[in-house]
Image (cartoon, rainbow, N blue to C red):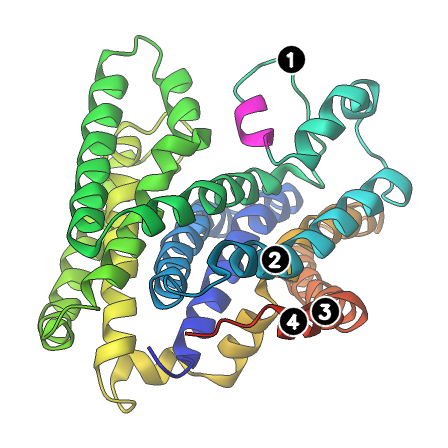
């Protein structure tokens, strides 16, 4: 891809909206017992897939960058410097905010801060969450997914650099196959479904599967004639995998349709189908004409706007979620009004926070990327 595909920003926008809906509506449900509104809470649980969309998209974009810059003299230096400038400043700013400014930080977290802080600074909290005695504040709980991405960014550039294109394709397919087989056997043989669901939800080597799906598409697109093949199969892939994805959620009912919540169908197939339908959408974006139905939807200015600020929104949305929940709860409003006003207000406040953090910090850090430009 020589030019920026703005629809990918729209996909980021959808992803962050979904993640926020997951965290928002289950708390909005505190205000009402209306069966219809409680049904919305259940539907919003599908927001877990926003993280998986981010994973797959990251794998695609990062691999595209690495393949194009593979012959660059400063391949490793430029990649890691540019990633650090994009990711670290806001991440560490979020941690500082929680440590010094966030209200009502859980005592379990502050009591073990001397152990938890190094874990978070080194992006290892996803592993720590597998242990019952590790506590992370709700303000920063969502950073487990950022830890997985950082671990992937640390390893993947070396693999791309060392392997030629054919070996990279074989490696990616092999890894995905081992991941699916391992998760299937592990889930079916584990005596406690709750423990296995949690393990595969937070374990890096299980979640790398989705990033490698994205990387596989990026690698395949470098072959002659690949664009036509992707154009032909992208829509069928999306329709088939999305249909299975929906069916897996229906099979999870009446329980919680979330792969971490002891859902056998989603633990077995949710991650893979989420990655596949995301690949289908990306394939449509990069091969179909701009007037395509999906491209028109995802190039919507609102979605691309949200996508531009999605990282800031993701990092800081729990700040708005928790503080505004306290505000609305003490207002003594109950019923459908706070169920609507609380999420709406939280989305607006989160966007404002994202705009502030982006303009005060992130855009200045991104400006430093000019010193680490790729030469090829």
Q: Position of residue 233 (x, y in %)?
A: 10, 68
Q: What's the CA distance linking mark 1 and mark 2? A: 35 Å
At a point 35% along the width and 32% down the height, the residue shown is: 206
Q: Position of residue 302 (x, y in %)?
A: 53, 80
Q: Check residue 81 in the rendering and tell me which mark sits there, or answer none.
A: 2
Q: Are marks 1 and 2 in contact (CB under 8 Å)?
A: no
Helix, strand or loop for disc 3? helix
Q: Which residue is mark 4?
A: 371
Q: Secondary structure at mark 4?
A: helix
Q: Which region shows up in magenta? A: 124-129
Sequence-first tag of 2 and 3: 2
Residue under label 3, please give it. Answer: 358
Task: Indicate which disc, 1 or 4, sits on the residue closer to the N terminus.
Answer: 1
Residue 262 seen in render: yes
Dot 4 or dot 3, earlier in sequence: 3
Closer to the camera: disc 3 or disc 1?
3
Tell me which residue sits at (63%, 75%) in the image: 370
Secondary structure of residue under mark 2: helix
Instruction: Tell me if residue 336 can be seen.
Output: no
Q: Residue most toward the right?
A: 100
Q: Which tag is nearer the camera, tag 1 or tag 4?
A: 4
């Amino acid at each position: 891809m020589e030019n920026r595909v703005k629809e990918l920003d729209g996909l980021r926008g959808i992803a962050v909206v979904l993640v926020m809906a997951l965290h928002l509506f289950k708390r909005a449900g505190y205000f009402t017992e209306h069966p219809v509104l409680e049904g919305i809470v259940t539907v919003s649980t599908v927001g877990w897939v926003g993280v998986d969309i981010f994973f797959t998209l990251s794998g695609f974009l990062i691999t595209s960058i690495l393949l194009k810059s593979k012959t660059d003299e400063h391949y490793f230096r430029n990649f890691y410097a540019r990633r650090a400038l994009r990711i670290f400043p806001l991440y560490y700013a979020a941690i500082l905010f929680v440590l010094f400014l966030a209200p009502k930080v859980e005592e379990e977290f502050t009591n073990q801060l001397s152990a938890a802080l190094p874990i978070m600074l080194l992006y290892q909290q996803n592993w720590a969450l597998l242990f019952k005695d590790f506590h992370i504040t709700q303000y920063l709980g969502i950073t487990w997914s950022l830890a997985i991405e950082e671990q992937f960014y640390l390893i993947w550039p070396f693999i791309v650099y060392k392997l030629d294109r054919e070996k990279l394709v074989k490696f990616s397919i092999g890894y995905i196959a081992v991941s699916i087989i391992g998760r299937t056997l592990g889930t079916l043989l584990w005596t406690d479904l709750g423990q296995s669901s949690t393990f595969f939800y937070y374990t890096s080597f299980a979640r790398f599967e989705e990033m490698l799906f994205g990387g596989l598409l990026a690698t395949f697109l470098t072959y002659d004639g690949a664009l036509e093949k992707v154009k032909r199969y992208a829509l069928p892939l999306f329709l088939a995998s999305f249909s299975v994805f929906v069916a897996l959620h229906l099979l999870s009912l009446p329980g919680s349709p979330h792969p971490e919540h002891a859902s056998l169908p989603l633990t077995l197939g949710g991650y893979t189908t989420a990655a596949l339908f995301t690949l289908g959408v990306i394939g449509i974006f990069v091969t179909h004409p701009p007037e395509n139905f999906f491209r028109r939807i995802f190039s919507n200015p609102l979605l691309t706007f949200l996508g531009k600020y999605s990282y800031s929104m993701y990092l800081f949305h729990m700040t708005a979620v928790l503080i505004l929940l306290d505000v609305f709860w003490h207002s003594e409003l109950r019923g459908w009004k706070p169920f609507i006003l609380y999420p709406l207000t939280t989305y607006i406040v989160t966007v404002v926070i994202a705009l502030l953090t982006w303009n005060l910090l992130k855009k200045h850090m991104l400006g430093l990327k000019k010193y680490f430009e790729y030469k090829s």
